[in-house]
Image (tube, rainbow, N blue to C red):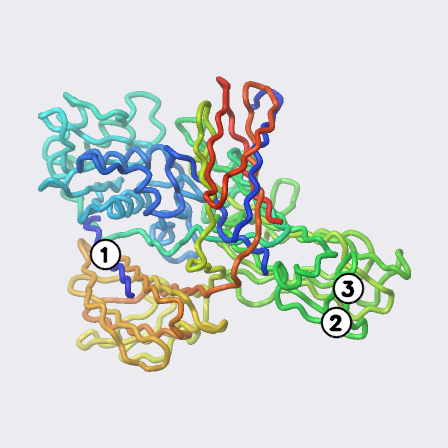
Amino acid sequence: MLYFNIMNIHCTRKGRKMRIVLITLLICVCSYALVYSPRIAIEGQPDFYSLETITKSIIKKEMTNKEKAEAVWRFVLASTFHYKSPEEGLPDNGIRFEMNTLEDPLKLLNSYGYLYCFANVSLMTKLWEAAGFDSTRVWGIGGHLISEVYYDGAWHHYDGDQSVSSYFIKADGKTAASIDEIQKNPEYYILNPKFRSNPQMPFDTAVSYEHESREVLARFYRTNEDNYIRDRMGVTTHKMDYYLKKYEDLTLYFEPQGKWRQNGMDVASINPANGPFDAHGNRKYGNGLFVYKPNLNDQSILDDGMNDVDNITLDNGIKLKDPAKRGEFTVKTLSPWVITGKPIGASTASDGREQYCGAATVSGWLHSVKNPMAILPCGIEILIRTEKNHNWESVYKFNRTGHFSVDLSKHFSMANYYYEVKVVLEKDTVGVKLENFSLETWVQVNPASLPSLKAGNNKIRFSTSPSSLDKVTYEHGSIPGAPVDAFVVSMDNVSVTKDPAKRFIQADTSKPATVVLKLESKNGAISDYWADMLFHQRETGSAIVEYSENDTLSYKKFNKKAKLHHDHWADWHSIISLAEKKNTTAVYFKVKLNGKAALCVFNSGYRYPFKKANGKVNVEFTVDVDGKEKIIPFNPEGNKGEENINLKGSTIRNRSIKFISR
């Protein structure tokens, strides 16, 4: 089955002492102890797992088209706030700011929760499309980007940016006006509206941003000679899938723990204890914490939580099978939420230390049975590789007995959702064991995405991903900052430049140019893969993409072209989904450039099936209820994973949700 999405979206306290309620759920999931994507959903609240689950939970069958469009608008307003858009990962700062902007709806909604207008329009349009609307488009109006959806024979504008939060109502008192109609009469729609949406901004007072002023926003619409319809879309490769290893816990916090990630800004202006915040309210980011602390007497972890085990055994600790040889193992961490770390742009604090927001820490205790105070001839070495840096990098060597703790934060300055730690034990002459080994990983979470308990009845559903969705690793690459030959198989009539805005351009624009790029799995057959391509096009420039699986080089055409409006960027994104049993290990992408076109960025990745999961997990909600501490059991019947919890109280404050894999 083929899914190829090339779309032109036309455009353009401190409080009282904490009281804790522990709500405990024990579920046996379906012989490895991995648990895939354990998650909680509460009836009546949006389910942020996918675009499909979101729209299914906010759209009702009996709704009119207007009500559906407005439901998406209200969901975006409730789930996000206005703050500098996250940037993820183009390691070349020469690329224009807006091209670095994260646009993946699931990352924005689940991990960040804040964004500017040019990411908000991608979020709005992708959700409308998931809700069943056929046509959406994006406009640039001076200093602001806005979105429209087509239904009932006309275009209708809804501004999902939390700093504007409006739609404008026509003279009939109910119909949302189009951008074209607002441009022709901003005095009526913006300055002196007869009818107002609820909510409606811009603000009359307390303006925090320029376009929150009605006069400024009206001017943006009125001076329509610089307004344009823009080609742009949100990237949708991300999945909220992950896995918990045996003896791994995940705690999702509704409130910030001082661990945040913001790439590409002056972090010195942000108090690390605060991080991103809502200028118009008290909304902030949240956090998550993975803690892997295995039982070092349980031999099963050598097949479950640890990978690439060589010459390692367990005996109240980790030790060498053959002391005359070195041994090693790796631990992989996959998170659907972005890992925090050292923000790009952060150098040193006032006391001269490097600035970190906390990402990952590996720790343990080296103990010598024969000589507890020994200085070891060799000892232990810690190495790391991340989603954005595939090469192993040594980060720590320790040749004494005793406790060690290694902060890995500086290796996460780019956006990462996956990394591996390798632990190497050198050959042993004094009976060394590695004890109390643990790996902690902090991630950033949008609190609005977390299911929260309310006073009254809460119908809770627990689930894990079906086995057909067991995708547990990512492999990414990006031309900027990487050797060109890492992906390029062949080129014809192409010049390769150092300019990240025009990485591959036509040498002779009078004839077509062709670039062939290859994505190859080093882990065997893959279950699905994707490619993100950014093109720069002017005037008559266009591009065609074809693909071929394995080494057959029998290319299939997508037969779609991207067109550029008003000399702005065009962003293509493609997703190809394969049947899981298909034996595909390599994919070739043939890009044909015509006219004045350039291929700027090629990002690619793949997933492959992992071990079947047969673990079990406990779930704990931590909640304040009227200052009283209660423990409420949650025991779903059979395999339904559902039960009702009735909370009685006038004040409910959600603190965290914890998944405990055993």
Q: Left of 402 or right of it: where is 123?
A: left
> Which of marks 3 and 2 precedes in the sequence?
3
Q: Residue at x 55, y 18 (%)?
A: 626
Tell me the element at label 3.
strand
Q: Amino acid at mark 1?
A: Met
Q: Residues within 10 Å of mark 2 (few under 14, many from 20)?
A: many
| Observer able to see residue 357 | no
| Observer able to see residue 180 | yes
Q: Residue at x 73, y 62 (%)?
A: 397
Q: Amino acid at mark 3?
A: Lys
What x and y, as percent, mark residue 475?
47, 64
Q: Which residue is mark 1?
A: 7
660 to 408, vertically: above or below: above
> Which of marks 1 and 3 precedes in the sequence?
1
What x and y, as percent, mark residue 231?
22, 53
Disc 3 from disc 1: Cα separation? 55 Å
Q: Which residue is mark 3?
A: 319
Q: Residue at x 47, y 73 (%)?
A: 524
Disc 2 from disc 3: Cα separation? 10 Å
Disc nearest the viewer among 3 and 1? 3
Q: Residue at x 78, y 64 (%)?
A: 379
Q: Nearer the viewer, residue 278 or 604?
A: 604
| Residue furthest bottom as drawn | 552
Tell me the element at label 2.
loop
258 to 540, vertically: above or below: above
What x and y, as percent, mark residue 38?
50, 47
Q: Amino acid at mark 2?
A: Arg
Q: Nearer the viewer, residue 65 or 468?
A: 468
